[in-house]
Structures are given as structure tokens and as C-alpha cells.
Image (cartoon, coloured by chain):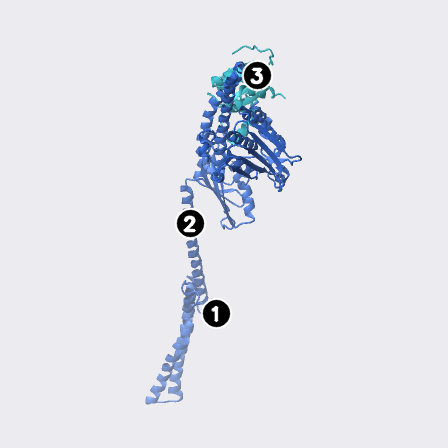
Chain colours: A cyan, B blue
């Protein structure tokens, strides 16, 4: 992944679990420019393993990924027996359209829910910067 | 046997008595005629025969009644219980018998007992036939069928039920239905609340629920079914409610996983859209400043086009939701001037591309509105979008907001564009209806106004249009003051829109900057 070359490093690490290479490329580019350190994983199992190391401040979790789905990863991350400690925020990203109940159910478990087609990379960066606020 | 012997003894006694009297009479007769009166010859003969002849006439006649009494009583008893003649012949009273009373009484009692035994057997037979009937139906029925008693406990569950819930029938019997089957309903009225309400009000009642589920959405092994319930207050066998389940787990779960055609298409459309918008932003930010005016304009237009495409994708989704009754609104208290300002701010970019200005005139002291901010934003965005589309370059669009005579918040969007032909006006809010003349030059799908109308009406408001060809159009819609909606109990229960908490709405507003 690109090394951090921005002047203002936020010191924060982002895990991007996304199987669409072009999308993760755009997000990584924008996030890196904004001072984040970004790692990308392409499937659910790898994503879960990486997230469980608990080194990430933000986890961007796509729902439709190979291996276990984003929602299953989310459940595992929220299960204390599987993930004893997780300090980072988990944001679900998706281009799926879901029934209200399903979406609310997911939103409850996550720290955010984003429809990828509705934001640009810069807007994603803005959104993440407001997370701690 | 004892009774019969007693009877024979009694009968013999009477017979003996009768014959004794008869013989005594004859002897006495002979004695009187021969020894006392001393008749001879023919007179003597006639006098002697007279008595036997007379007693032959009288004695049988006198004794028949008493001798046939037992038979008569028996006859009476039989006629009394025989189905055809029961009403005509009264029950005998064997206490009045002299001859053979014990025998006849005993026989009559046996007769009565026999009758009730026969009746009992008939009833049992009928019931058995019925039970076979119901049991056959219940066990052959391929749908889960559950019968509840007055306490809503399961008194009967057929085999299909046991198979459906993967529990042996013995485990289900006797349990209360809510413990045995953990059902969640998509309506406010649940089985429990419905039973509660009908128990005191109706003699019979029926209800159907769709999409009842066990387990959580998306959970493995959860079942989804339609439920039909029948309640009968007066069933004598203690059965009170009957439930039948129609399984739809396969089809409903598919819906849940959003694999319906529209949802799938939307997903396919969104992926390239995400990329397009991302690249456009990169180019805009990093190359844009170095490009000449024309190129910069092209970049802006490309951006606007991508946003339009995204909006359309959103629209078709919403239309699908409306069709499917899935569009849910949460009406909250909204500061209307703020709502207007935020939409107008966002639309100014697209307007600015062609030099079109948007002016707002918002009345002072407006009441707070009852609105679902997300969808009402879409309505305003749609109206402004149309106004921009149909305006000429450098035109002015005006947004006026007043509190009208009925106390509603009335918002109108006025443009000086091409206007709408009279013939089209009545159809303008129809789905996919487009003005054919303009179709070639102006993009759009014909869904925006259809959606706008659905959303406004879901807010209990109204939307209408005034327009003239060449003189522009004014689209007006009303929303109710929050106070009015609250009074009618129509507002949402959570203090904040869920998505706001995650900054989603803020993101949407950052859309165009």
C-alpha cells in the first residue's frame, strides 16, 4: 500500500475490507492523502482476522465480499468471545439496497452505514473525520 | 328367574281359586237341586246345567282383566319406548299390578336400560365416526394446524406442525402457543392482542397475518409464514381457536436478502456509479484547476450527470418500495426554513451550471413542520430539478413558503420555463408520464413527480400544479404543522432520524459543494 506521504498525518489507521479493487484504490488514495494509514483486505475471513488485531481506528466493511459476509464479520467483531477488544469504529459500506428492518438491524450493530454510490471519496474522508466528534 | 317363578305361583294360585269357586258352585248347585229342592227329570237336568253355563259366561269375562294385566303392562312399556308410538302411550305404573308385579317391574326396567344402552352406543358410534373424520383430515392436511383451548394452550397439533417446527407433537401439546412458537409479527396486531380483543366481543372471528416469522431477520433456521386464525367462543369440546400456517420461508427470505430484480439491478448500477463519481472528483480536484474554461465546464457537467444518474437509481428504488408498500416515513419536527435552505443550497450548483438563479421567499414565524426530512428533501430536490431542467439559461426560479388559510405550510416552486400543456396537466403526476415533445432534449424519467406526490400524500399533504405553455409552471405542495400531526398521533417515536446519527444526511448535503 502507499506509504503515508501527506503533511498532516492523523496517526490513524484504517482497515478497508473491499473486494472491488477500483473502489478500494480510490478510497485508499483519498484516505492516504488525508493522512490515514490504510490497509486493504479482499475477503471476509482475511478482513476479520486483520480487524481482530485491534490496531485499526476505523474499519470500513463491505457487505458483499467473498468468504464470510460483512454482516457476519460485524457480528464476530461485536461478539466478545470472538473479539475480546475492539477500540475502532466499524462502518458498513455497501451498494446493496436492503429492507428497512435489515438495514436498521445492521445500523444498530455498526457505527455507521454508508451507501458507496452516494458519496465520493472526499465525502468519505469528511464523514470519517466527523466520527469522533 | 326368581321373578318368573313367583309370577307362575301367583298365576297358579289364581287359577286354582277360579276353578275352586267354579267347582263349589257346581256342587252346591247339584246339592240344592237334588237334595234340597229334590227336582227330578228334565227340571233337575236343566237346573244342574244352568250354573256351569252361567259361570262359563261370567267367570272368564271377570278374570281375563286381572290375568292379562302383566301382559298389558309390558305392552305399554314397549309401546312407550318404541320410537314411533312413544308419544301416544304413557309409561306404565307397575306398582298398580297385582299379578306378577315384581316380574313386570323387573322386565320394564331391563327394557328401559336396554334402550339407554342402545342410545349410548349410537352416540358413541357417531362421535367415533366424527373423530375418525377430523383426525383423518387433521393428520392428512399438509399444512401445520394447531388447535388452542381457552387458555391459549395447544390441545392439538397435527403431524405437519410437528414436522414444520421440528418438535415432536408430545412436546407441543399442553404448552401455551407463545412459548411453543416464538412468533414475531410485522403488524401491530399480534395473535395475542387479537385473541384478547375478540374473546370478549365476538362469537366467531377470523384474522390473517402475512410474513410472521420465527427467529431474527436473516437468521439461519428462521421460518416465515402466513398465519390464518379462526376463533369460536361456543365450541362445546373446549376448542376455542384454530390456527393454520402457510409456509413462505423460501420466497420471503429471498425478499429479505434483497435479491429481487430491482434491488439486484440497483446494486449493479451503483458499483460503476461509485467509480465514476470517484474519478470525476479526483479529476476535478487535481486536474480541474489546470484546465481551460470549457474543459472545466465539461467536468462540472460530467459530475452533474453522474449525480443525476445516482438520483435516478435512488428514485427507481423508491418507486419499487412504494409499489411494494415498503416506503416508511418517520415524521418528526422540522424547521421548515432550514429544510428549504439546505435543498436550495444543494441545487444551486446544478442551477449555476446554466446561469439559473434560485431565490427564496420564506414567510416569518412559520410553525414547525411535521416531516420525514429525508423524503421531503427528495420532493423539494425533484421539484427544483424539474424547474431547472425546464428553465432556459439564466432564468430565475423562485421558492415561496407561506402559512396558508388552513394553517398548512405551503411551498411553491416557480419557474419561467417552457410550461406544461393543458392536455398533459392531469397526468403529470402519473408514473412515467412524460411530455413527449420535450423528451428528446430534456433528460428525466417521469418518476420524480410520481414519487413526490406519493411522499407528500404520505405526509397528509397535497401537491398540485399551475402551468401554461410559454409562461412557466408553479408546483405547490403542503405539509402539516408538527403540532397538528402530533395531535393526531402521527409522529415517529424516536427523537432523531436514525441515519442522522451516522452523519448520513450531512453527507448527502455535502453532495454538491
Report whether residue A94 is seen: no
CB-based contact (under 8 Å), mark 3 and mark 2 = no
Nearer to us in this view, B486 or B203: B486
Q: Is residue B154 above or below residue B396?
A: below
Q: CA distance from mark 1 to mark 3?
A: 110 Å
View extreme (right): residue: B365
For residue A56, the mark is: 3
Of badges 1 and 3, the one in the foreground is 3
**SS class, disc 3:** loop
Chain to which mark 1 belongs: B
Of badges 2 and 1, the one in the foreground is 2
Left or right for A73, reference B70: right
Q: Quadrant of the C terminus of chain B?
A: top right
Q: Residues within 10 Å of mark 3 (few under 14, many from 20)?
A: many
Nearer to us in this view, B506 or A99: B506
Tag 2 residue: B130
Chain to which mark 3 belongs: A
Q: Position of residue B58 (x, y in %)?
A: 39, 79
Q: Toward which corner of the image does residue B103 lie, by quadrant?
A: bottom left
Tag 1 residue: B96
Nearer to us in this view, B311 or B242: B311
Q: Earlier in the sequence, mark 2 or mark 1?
A: 1
Q: CA distance from mark 3 to mark 2?
A: 70 Å
Q: Is residue B23 above or below residue B400?
A: below
Q: Toward which corner of the image does residue B333 lie, by quadrant?
A: top right
View extreme (front): residue: B470
Q: Position of residue B485 (x, y in %)?
A: 61, 39
Are tags 1 and 3 found on a single chain?
Answer: no
Amino acid at each position: 500500500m502507499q506509504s503515508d506521504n501527506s503533511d498532516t498525518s492523523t496517526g490513524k489507521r484504517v482497515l478497508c475490507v473491499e473486494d472491488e479493487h477500483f473502489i478500494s484504490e480510490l478510497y485508499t488514495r483519498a484516505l492516504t492523502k488525508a493522512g490515514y494509514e490504510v490497509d486493504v483486505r479482499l475477503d471476509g475471513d482475511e478482513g476479520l482476522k486483520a480487524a481482530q488485531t485491534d490496531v485499526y481506528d476505523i474499519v470500513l466493511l463491505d457487505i458483499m465480499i467473498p468468504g464470510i459476509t460483512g454482516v457476519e464479520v460485524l457480528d464476530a467483531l461485536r461478539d466478545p468471545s470472538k473479539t475480546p477488544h475492539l477500540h475502532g469504529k466499524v462502518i458498513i459500506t455497501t451498494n446493496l439496497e436492503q429492507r428497512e428492518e435489515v438495514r436498521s438491524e445492521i445500523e444498530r450493530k455498526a457505527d455507521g452505514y454508508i451507501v458507496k454510490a452516494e458519496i465520493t471519496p472526499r465525502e468519505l474522508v469528511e464523514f470519517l473525520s466527523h466520527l469522533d466528534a | 328367574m326368581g321373578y318368573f317363578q313367583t309370577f307362575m305361583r301367583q298365576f297358579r294360585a289364581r287359577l286354582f281359586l277360579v276353578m275352586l269357586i267354579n267347582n263349589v258352585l257346581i256342587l252346591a248347585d247339584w246339592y240344592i237341586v237334588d237334595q234340597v229342592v229334590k227336582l227330578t227329570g228334565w227340571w233337575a237336568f236343566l237346573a244342574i246345567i244352568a250354573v256351569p253355563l252361567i259361570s262359563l259366561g261370567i267367570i272368564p269375562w271377570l278374570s281375563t282383566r286381572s290375568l292379562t294385566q302383566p301382559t298389558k303392562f309390558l305392552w305399554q312399556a314397549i309401546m312407550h319406548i318404541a320410537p314411533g308410538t312413544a308419544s301416544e302411550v304413557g309409561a306404565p305404573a307397575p306398582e298398580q299390578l297385582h299379578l306378577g308385579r315384581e316380574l313386570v317391574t323387573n322386565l320394564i326396567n331391563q327394557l328401559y336400560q336396554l334402550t339407554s344402552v342402545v342410545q349410548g352406543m349410537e352416540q358413541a358410534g357417531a362421535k367415533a365416526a366424527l373423530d375418525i373424520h377430523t383426525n383423518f383430515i387433521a393428520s392428512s392436511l399438509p399444512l401445520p394446524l394447531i388447535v388452542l383451548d381457552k387458555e391459549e394452550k395447544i390441545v392439538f397439533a397435527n403431524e405437519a406442525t410437528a414436522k414444520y417446527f421440528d418438535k415432536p407433537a408430545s412436546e407441543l401439546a399442553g404448552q401455551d402457543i407463545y412459548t411453543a412458537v416464538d412468533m414475531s409479527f410485522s403488524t401491530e396486531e399480534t395473535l395475542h392482542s387479537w385473541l384478547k380483543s375478540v374473546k370478549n366481543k365476538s362469537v366467531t372471528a377470523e384474522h390473517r397475518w402475512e410474513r410472521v416469522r420465527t427467529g431474527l431477520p436473516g437468521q439461519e433456521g428462521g421460518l416465515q409464514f402466513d398465519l390464518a386464525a379462526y376463533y369460536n367462543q361456543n365450541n362445546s369440546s373446549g376448542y376455542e381457536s384454530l390456527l393454520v400456517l402457510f409456509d413462505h420461508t423460501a420466497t420471503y427470505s429471498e425478499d429479505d436478502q434483497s435479491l429481487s430484480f430491482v434491488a439486484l439491478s440497483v446494486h449493479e448500477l451503483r458499483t460503476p456509479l461509485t467509480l465514476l463519481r470517484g474519478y470525476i472528483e479526483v479529476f476535478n480536484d487535481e486536474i480541474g484547476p489546470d484546465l481551460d474554461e470549457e474543459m472545466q465546464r465539461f467536468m462540472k457537467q460530467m459530475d452533474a450527470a453522474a449525480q443525476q444518474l445516482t438520483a435516478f437509481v435512488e428514485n427507481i428504488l423508491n418507486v419499487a418500495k412504494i409499489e411494494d408498500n415498503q416506503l416508511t416515513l418517520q415524521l418528526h419536527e422540522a424547521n421548515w426554513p432550514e429544510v428549504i435552505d439546505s435543498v436550495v443550497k444543494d441545487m444551486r450548483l446544478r442551477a449555476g451550471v446554466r446561469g439559473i438563479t434560485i431565490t427564496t421567499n420564506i414567510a416569518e414565524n412559520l410553525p414547525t413542520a411535521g416531516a420525514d426530512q429525508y423524503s421531503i428533501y427528495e420532493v423539494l430536490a425533484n421539484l427544483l430539478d424539474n424547474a431547472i431542467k425546464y428553465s432556459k439559461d439564466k432564468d430565475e426560479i423562485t421558492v415561496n413558503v407561506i402559512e396558508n388559510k388552513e394553517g398548512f405550510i405551503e411551498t411553491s416552486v416557480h419557474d419561467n420555463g417552457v410550461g406544461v400543456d393543458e392536455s398533459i396537466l392531469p397526468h403529470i403526476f402519473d408514473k412515467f408520464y412524460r411530455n413527449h415533445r420535450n423528451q428528446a432534449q430534456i433528460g428525466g424519467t417521469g418518476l420524480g413527480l410520481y414519487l413526490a406526490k406519493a411522499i407528500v400524500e404520505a405526509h397528509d399533504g397535497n401537491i398540485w400544479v399551475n402551468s401554461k405553455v410559454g409562461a412557466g409552471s408553479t408546483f405547490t405542495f403542503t405539509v402539516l404543522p408538527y403540532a397538528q400531526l402530533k395531535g393526531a398521533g402521527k409522529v415517529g417515536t424516536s427523537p432523531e432520524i436514525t441515519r442522522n446519527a451516522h452523519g448520513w444526511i450531512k453527507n448527502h448535503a455535502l453532495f454538491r459543494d
